[in-house]
Image: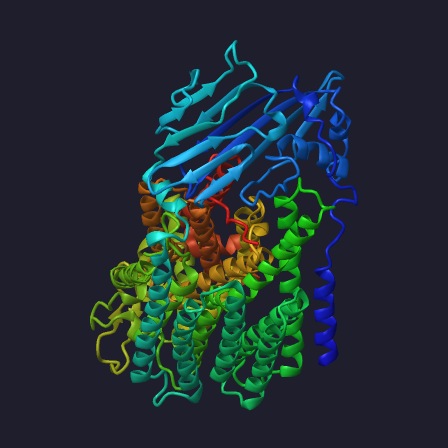
Amino acid sequence: MRLIVVALVTLACWLTAPAEAHGTVGIAGDCAVHRLASARASASLRLLHHGRTHSRAESVMTVRVPTSWPLAPKLLMGEDSGAYRQALGCLVREEAGAQLLRPDEWRKAPPHITSDGKEVRIRMETHAWVDASHVALGPWRIETGLTRWTIRFKAPEALRAARWDTIEIDPGAQGAEWARPEPSAGRGAHALVWKPSTGSARSIPEIAVRTTPPWQRAWAARDGRDMNNVGVLGGLVWMVGIAAVATTAVRSARRRPAGALGTPEETSAARRLVGWVWLSPALAVLNGFAVGPPDDEAVLGVALSAVAAVAMAALCHRGPAVIAVTGSLGAAAITSILVSSSTKALITANVLAQSALLCGALVWARQLSAPHRRPGLPVLVPLSVALAAVLVGCHLWLSERGWDRVSWLSDPATDEYATRHGEHLTSGLQELAADSASWLLGYDTVLTALAIVALLRARGTAPQSQHAAPAAPDILLMMLLYTAFVTPLIGSYLNNGTLVWLQIGLDIALLGLLLIVGGRRSTLAQRLDVSGRPLREVFAEAHRVDFLHRARQYRELHATLRRLDHGQSDETTMTRAAVERRLRGLHRWRTPGHTNRQASDRLPSDVTVVDVVLAWGPRATWWENGRLAATYASFLAAPASALMTWRTWIQNGSWEQTSWGAADTALTLLLWGLGWVGAGFLLGALWRLLPGRRGPARALGLGLAYALPIGLDALARLATDEGHGEAALDVSLTLLILTVTALAMDLETFRGERRYWPSRLSLLLSVYQMRYLALQAAYLIAQIVAAITIWQFVTDGGGPTETPIKFQP
């Protein structure tokens, strides 16, 4: 074990070795500023406020230098060339000899450089998100106040003697309050333009413009300041709300156990669920007190990781071995960071802290998924260490990419560069240590979902259980699973998560409304004509074979009626009256306890034997129906989750903008997939309670419950003028997955007839009757077309652009 740890830590240390930054050529040397008097330049800045959380600032600066400038040929070198960096740095550096670090500035592409033999033309396009008190990009500075922003322009030192053809500032639809000096022209509705006058063609003073941005963007720009801090409280209230609902559901389950007296598995699963949901907010509160200097925050973060790991191990109730292992890893992490603050010590502490956390999480997950198996520490511990080393290695890799971005025109040959680089690496590792536990707690819904499913499994597989449909405690647990894991998080507006806790009540209310109001229209809620008893109380798995046989007869008799309606008959064809008499006979129901002399009961007039079989589902219990539906949903969930992850994290570059970007991308892929699998599970588990006669109708009801909160969230975002992200695509894919899963469930219900049909489509044709199949096919095709249309809309740039996560070194 020690060899594995040493090897992985050594690998992580090797990853941190500072590479040669774009060669060994420095940027030192004379910029020959006096030779740039004939250069020409222009600059523009545009603020975009609409349809986003933070305002986006877009800068374009164009410089034309004569080929007589000594450094002009160096601009034509490769982007990684030290000569190229030296020449370009001379043109954009604020002051001679200063290091150029731009943490706010982002570039979609390197500067575009062309030459015609007389001059070299450089066009630089950059952008930034206005989410801090000071934002710098290109020659611009943006200072954000409470309600007003000040935009300042200052020419780079080397170009102050150059001729500036135009300087343009577009502050947005609100326009400018004042500008100093006054602009010489305007462009469009609200852009200001400065052009040199004849008498002062080369004199470009500094420019300042005051503007009042939309209140939504001004509020969001105060990132982490003022009342934005209450967003942390909103997240805590969300966790406490989930814990309260879980506690209520567990108490209800204890009052109504699945079997006569309950089972040990049910008792153990209930205890673990309650313990975990209350552990999460407790750790979040402890993490909130870990505030102080970076060194102290790193120590406190590692200590909290150790506490969280030991707490998860204790909840497993698998003996002292698990606690000893996680505690040892946590203690080693604390010792490492206390002994030394060097880079290697920080790397070691991070790897050990992450190992402890991951070991506790993996043991917890294994315990929930396989409660009768041993924890498997000989496998889980090396796996945890390996994953921790990968996480820290990915952080170091992303940290280096971030440093290359912010220092791309600095001089790597100077001592200041090396010092700033080391500070960047150290601060990133300290932040990583401080955020380890809080980052994992951000994905605690996975472990919460596992705990809920473990309790549902214990209740659904209890041998004495007599519930054909989920009981009230099971439904409450499913509502908890639905709001805590399946539905996307909503309620975060203006960079503030204060209202996220409202989603709990909204999700539970809508799903409950679907089951209460829509459940009255469900097939098994209909009552027999004579006794008035609901079908849910009288139908059992023992009736399946008889009703499948009657359902096939029903379809064949209806096919006969259609032939008679078209005038088709032969010597074997019955009369219409005889066919109708046999159809009426298929609707008879003999209530248990009735004697032969007593009148038989009958199915409701609007319910057929086919409806009853389809409403019961392909499996004997609600748990087995849910597990089967989850399996079907997983086939479509895999490509759909890859699509959503690519769109939300990879395409816009968000994955490289945080210290946890690589891990977040992988976990986002997992969360999308598991969320849709969970939606499929709920569809199958609630199959007998959902309204609708056919599977797609049941899927539509659940899909509407899923879409309504997202629709309300979209209305709120419309009021705050924020982008909707991928909400429409999410809803479209969810409904598509649920619909296909429901079709598969209906086909599986009649799987015994599969051998008699040339294809599944032909079997579906028979089950749904021709008139239904045409409708279902059109409905499914419409969903596919809608999903493709939405995808094309957002990928072609028609959809609103969300603000990416800001890189934090």
Q: Please identify the quarter of the rendering in which residue 335 is found.
A: bottom right
Instruction: Locate the N terminus by quadrant.
Output: bottom right
Q: Which residue is nearer to you in this view: 396 or 550? A: 396
Q: Which residue is nearer to you in this view: 689 or 276? A: 276
Q: Which residue is nearer to you in this view: 183 or 360? A: 183
Q: Residue at x 40, y 57 (%)?
A: 489
Q: Position of residue 528 (x, y in %)?
A: 24, 69
Q: Where is 167 relative to 405, above or below? A: above
Q: Please identify the quarter of the rendering in which residue 242 is found.
A: bottom left
Q: Position of residue 177 (x, y in %)?
A: 34, 28
Q: How many numbered marks does the figure carry? A: 0
Q: Residue at x 47, y 30 (%)?
A: 46
Q: Residue furthest right?
A: 24
Q: Position of residue 529 (x, y in %)?
A: 22, 67
Determine if residue 735 is in view: yes
Q: Where is 604 relative to 91, above or below? A: below
Q: Position of residue 294 (x, y in %)?
A: 52, 63
Q: Is residue 6 left or right of residue 567?
A: right
Q: Residue furthest top?
A: 198
The colour scheme used here is rainbow
Q: Where is 101 relative to 43, above or below? A: below
Q: Residue at x 45, y 75 (%)?
A: 451
Q: Which residue is nearer to you in this view: 497 or 695? A: 497
Q: Residue at x 46, y 32 (%)?
A: 152
Determine if residue 619 is in view: no
Q: Please identify the quarter of the rendering in which residue 540 is found.
A: bottom left
Instruction: Locate the C terminus by quadrant.
Output: bottom right
